Amino acid sequence: MAWLSWIRRLRWSIFRLQKFNRNPPEDRLMRLGRVQPQVLVCVAVATHSFMLARPASAYVALMSGQRAKPLQGSFNKVPVLHSNQPEIVKGPGILVTTAPGTAIAAESNRPLRNATYTFNGDFGVHMHHKYYPSDLRKLGGLKDRGLLSLGLIAINPGDQPVTLEILRGSVKNSFEAPYLPNNLMGVKPLGKRPWNTGPGDATAVQMLREELDRRLRSSIVIPAHSKRVVISTDLPARGIANGLLQGRSDGPFQLAVVAAEENQNEQALLAVLRHGRLAPGRIYLNRIREIQTGEVFSRVAGVAIGDRYDASIDHNLNQGPLHVPLTSTSRHNFGTGDVQINPLTSRMIDSSVNNVGTYGVRYDVTMNLKGRGAHQLVLSHPVVSGKKPFTAFRGSIRIQQGEVVEEVHVGLRAGESLALTDLRLTPGRINSVNVSLVYPADATPGHLLSVVPVQQMAMLLQRQKRQKATQVKLSAQKKERKVVPNQAPPVAIEPINQPEKIRINLPTPVTEPTQQQALVRPRPATLPPPLPAVVPLPSPRYIYAISRQQQWLRQLQGR
């Protein structure tokens, strides 16, 4: 076949190219002319396609047959300390520090370089950790559980005192805001006392409202060459602690996050930092190469540049619905190539190479819309193939249309689309809609924000309702199904008993055996094979299928 011979020539040419690359440069130039141009083009295209492979697509049913537009927003330049690696802490120690030097890893007993960085001016902090102690006795029951104290420490390396002004912030743990992954699903309006489903959700809504928790100090002074605890909270076993801060300093300083054993005393937290040992639980130390190549994302322990993402987009709804990525990643950007992840300027060696979760980042998106008719603002999360539906987002969103401000709590599962609010569009003018959220911890980034006609969302809901009814019906039929044969098996064929033949033994004359007759041994009598219980009858369609297969094989062999 022609195409088989062409593939053989291509493989042989690739082998010659590999051998060609090992030759000196002069020999390469001489041999290059011997390779067919078509082969060189094919190899180049294949290599280009391999090196620039497209990222995994993200499917959202609401966007079926339509395209998304990139937001092309930008992050500000505020440095933020992220302490999320290790996410699951096994015991006391340093979690992350930006002071120069190294700290000893509990897993390898070897020094790891710190995420060195000096803050000066505006700064932010995000910390999110869980505690599962190595000592199983500390897991406890409902009330009797082990505790760690999680503390944020400010370090002043200079000769002058530094004042930190805390502008807004919140710190919560599982005792104050119990983690409820499947609670408050759907869209619910927020009141003065907001809904929350865990520490990450509770701190994010206070940051969204630009509040400072009443338990936090609004300012703190760090003397020269000294350290001070800025905030601290309990981290219960089998629990979570989360903190978000935004502030400003009048001088240079460094930050560290540490965990001490059952003690919020300031001296105990400072002693952990002086001891210079990292907290156990760093599970990615043996996967550094995979982190660098992007095969493993790890968690974030370092300083990211940007605590706010701003974007603005103009769209005419008379030309079609609007779809834009929100908290998009390299995997989930809906074909736009718009990746909304801020970089890390310093990190621990086992940290992710960028702020892949964007936890604690505030997103402000302004949509300037033209159009008429009833529309809805919709938030979606793509279907994740190979995984069961999971809770992809639990958080609060602020929506402003002109002078009208609305706050809602959203519980969204993967593969789901939820209408956040109805849009009031005035024909003949630009309608400005602003969407704001502080991305909460324990959410899965890569969402789609859409403005679609009410009919489009209604049709999607009806289709999903029919699909769900069909699945329920099939599941019920599967449970009631009884596997029985359509007809009884064929009756076994009884063997025919024939009357035995009467043998008459006649006397034979006695003769002397010859030498040839003496050497021949008598063979044992062999019985005929028994008849089968069921005699199979070949079906005509089987005979036809076999003949077609044999004809196909003969064609492949060139007969």
Image (spheres, rainbow, N blue to C red):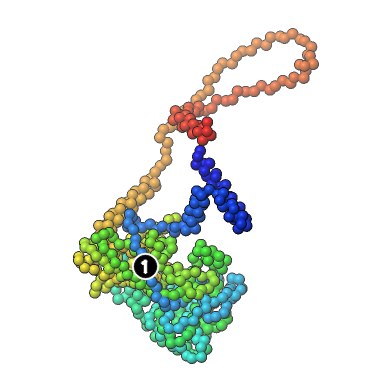
Of the pair 105 and 306, the residue shown nearer to us:
306
Q: Quick check: 381 left or right of 20?
A: left
Residue 409, position as x, y percentages in the image = 33, 69
Q: Residue at x 52, y 76 (%)?
A: 115
Q: Position of residue 361 (x, y in %)?
A: 40, 73
* Three-letter residue code for mark 1: Gln
Left or right of 398? Residue 138 is right
Q: Is residue 186 visible?
A: no
Can residue 509 be seen by looking at this rendering?
Answer: yes
Which image quadrant is residue 501 in?
top right
* Front position in the image: 251 or 213: 251
Q: Which residue is mark 1?
A: 72
Question: Which quadrant holds residue 110?
Answer: bottom right
- Asked which secondary structure carries label 1, the reply is loop
Instruction: Provide residue 500's location: percent of width, then percent of height.
Output: 59, 16
Instruction: Judge from the rendering whether residue 343 lies leftward or rightward of residue 110; answer left or right.
Output: left
Instruction: Give above or below for 495 relative to 264.
Output: above
Nearest the viewer among 530 and 299 is: 299
The residue under the point 43% across, 56% down is: 385
Relative height, residue 257 to residue 487 (above, below):
below
User: Alpha-carbon neighbours of circle 1 within 10 Å: few (<14), some, or many (≥20)?
Assistant: some
Q: Residue placed at 33% from the left, 55% from the top?
A: 64
